Image: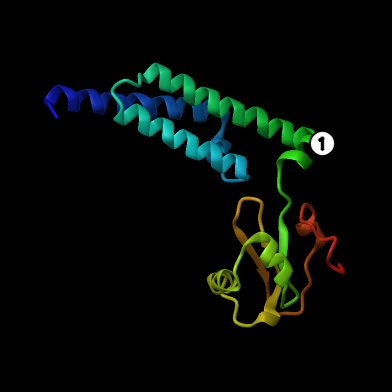
Amino acid sequence: MTLTEAVLLILSVLGIFTIIIVLTRVFGLRTFAKMSSFDFASTVAIGSVLASIILNSDYSIVKGGIALATIIGFQTVFAFLVRKSEFFRKIFTNKPQIIMWNGKILHEKLKSCNVSEDNLIAKLREANVHDFDEVKAVIFESTGDISVIHNSEKKGVDYRILNDVKTDYLHV
């Protein structure tokens, strides 16, 4: 790599990151939030475009900026439609699933979510669960994250927390 190529690389990195900062300020912090599988896909696409701009000399900063603005703009429109349209939300988003309820592992739900019991137990350890009886609910979120709701008292779960969770197979 020549000195000129190194300087151009540095300038392209600074330029594209400036574009990313401006786009994030315009479209908001949700740009890089992992709230849905679509958000995750958008983040991967943005990373791919960034890498292409930085590493490929045939890929201009203007072209990359347009690609980034398109991805982020589409993500913003998609998020708006999901928020405003029940029909759109049902078609394009996954409902979170309960995979453990009141200390009992729901093996069929684990299987349908493609989560192993070992993965579930690892998440319980991360959440500092000492005993299965402490677990009120474990939710496989639409993002792929696993949320653990637990306490050592006999407190139940406020059902507003389960508002968007698929619970039709539970007796709640």
Task: Pick the quarter of the image with the N terminus.
Answer: top left
Q: Position of residue 81 (x, y in %)?
A: 73, 31
Compared to residue 19, the image places residue 115 above or below, namely below
Q: What residue is at 55 percent from the left and 43 percent from the top?
A: 40
Residue 161 as seen in the image, left or right of residue 127: right
Residue 5 as seen in the image, left or right of residue 126: left
Q: Identify the image quadrant of residue 113.
A: bottom right
Q: How are the residues colored?
A: rainbow
- Residue at numbered disc 1: 87
Compared to residue 98, the image places residue 24 above or below, namely above
Q: Position of residue 95 (x, y in %)?
A: 73, 51
Q: Position of residue 91 (x, y in %)?
A: 76, 39
> Is label 1 in a helix, a strand or a loop?
helix
Identified by mark 1, the residue type is Phe
Q: Position of residue 136 (x, y in %)?
A: 73, 72
Residue situated in front as seen by the camera: 78 or 28: 78
* Mark 1 Cα-neighbour bin, 10 Å: few <14, some 14–19, many ≥20: few
Q: Identify the image quadrant of residue 114.
A: bottom right
Residue 25 as seen in the image, left or right of residue 18: right
Q: Residue furthest right?
A: 171
Compared to residue 39, the image places residue 130 above or below, namely below
